Image (tube, grey):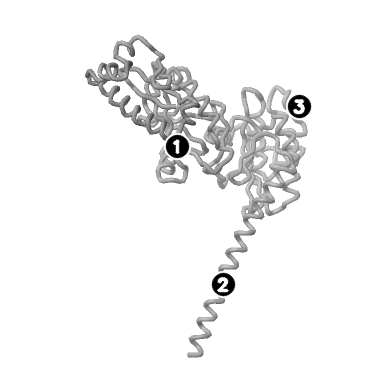
Amino acid sequence: MYILNMRGKNYSFFMNEEIKNESKENIEKKKKNLISLAILLAGLFIGSLFVDLSQLVKGGGISQKVLNNKDVFQLDGRTWVAYSDPIIDVTIVNDDECEECNIDEALVWFRKIVPTMLANKVEYDSVEGKEAIDEFDVKYLPMFIFGREVEGTEFYKQAESLFAQKGEKYVLDTAKLGLPSGKYVEIPRIEDDSIKVGSDDAKVKLIAFSDFQCPYCQLFHKTIEDILSEYGDQVQLVFKNLPLDSLHPKARGAALAVECANDQGKFMEYADKLFADQKTWGESTDNKIFSSYASKLGLDGTQFNQCMEDEKYKEKIEGDVQEASDFGISGTPALFIDDIFKSGVVQFEELKTLIDEKLGIIEEIVEVVEEENTKEDTEKEEVVDIESKE
């Protein structure tokens, strides 16, 4: 599709299949016609008589009067359509090698609602791509950056809440729009106070966002336990709370409780209890039941109750929720296997395959490094041996 602005109207034209398949001679002829057309259109801008000249030579042409009275017209095998929206420049930062990042269908949809969009694709690891990612603190691809002109479109007026403004540019929140994330350019933070199960030296990090009142999280918890048992110190679980308050009104209280239990080194035991009794505490009217669980698991009741009363980890939980939003995560369970993201309940075998691939890649890197180090040591020994002989 091609777009041209003429006196307040934007026109787009589409090439017919017959034109695409024309001979080289006809293509050259069409090029000449396009040059003539460019001259004619320039004449429209400066009020010249080029169009009249064209009408004399070709027996046809387009005058300003025609343009003013028509929203659709045909010229030289092309259909031109006028739109009230301005031309919109859109920079799309993406990774062409990422299969999950394919935007062909998305562009078709975008052009239906923003027909005057002109897309400029930029590779995420290029200088321009890196600058855009840093400027807008983007976590995932593809990334759509609109020019200021988008303010004048109906799409923007109806979906203003989906745009984040920075200067004269707007970044579209594709996650809120419903477009899946194709590739993450960074992973969630692992802080000193993060809930962790397993060694900090583990080769693979599993970062999970979960909701204790979510039935799908309950199912997935068993898979996580089996994975931790299978891999031991090779894998570390980093747990982040994402209570979905609108769906699960007791989830935030459970999140506070598990943080307080983790304060005493009992995260996994308390998490097991919460998922096992999900229905029971989910129907309770207050948070007293969480204290009873703490007592049954041998926690210091006074310390636990004070932690709950002070809402000691309220800000930490809110930080987890905000981080999930920054990464476009709106549902649970959600899991990062290092830089690979999976949404929903991942089956044990699928998760195991992903972890094995990660471990295999790491082992290959270690082997290459060891080979290089061995080679360097051998070369150094040979040099020393030669020098000693001299």
Disc 3 residue crowd, few under 14, some 14–19, many 20+, Cα 10 Å: few
Above or below, 57 against 146 in this view is above
- Please give the label number shown on residue 121: 1
Label 3 vs label 1: CA separation?
A: 49 Å
Of labels 3 and 1, the one closer to you: 1
Q: Residue at x 43, y 45 (%)?
A: 126
CB contact under 8 Å: marks 2 and 3: no
Q: Characterize the local packing of mark 2: few (<14), some (14-19) or many (20 or more) Cα atoms within 10 angstroms.
A: few
Secondary structure found at label 1: strand
Depth-wise, is mark 2 or mark 1 nearer the camera? 1
Residue 296, x across and y down, in percent: 77, 38
Give left or right: position of 142 versus 265: left
Residue with the mark numbered 2: 375
Q: Is 134 on the left or on the right of 299, as rendered? A: left
Q: CA distance from mark 2 to mark 1?
A: 43 Å
Q: Is residue 3 left or right of residue 337?
A: left
Q: CA distance from mark 2 to mark 3?
A: 61 Å
Who comes first in sequence, dot 3 or dot 1?
1
- Give the residue drawn at x 61%, y 38%: 240
The disc labelled 3 sits on which kind of residue?
Lys
Q: Quadrant of the N terminus?
A: top left
Residue in the foreground of this view, choosing between 351 and 225? 351
Relative to 112, residue 333 above or below: below
The residue under label 3 is 279
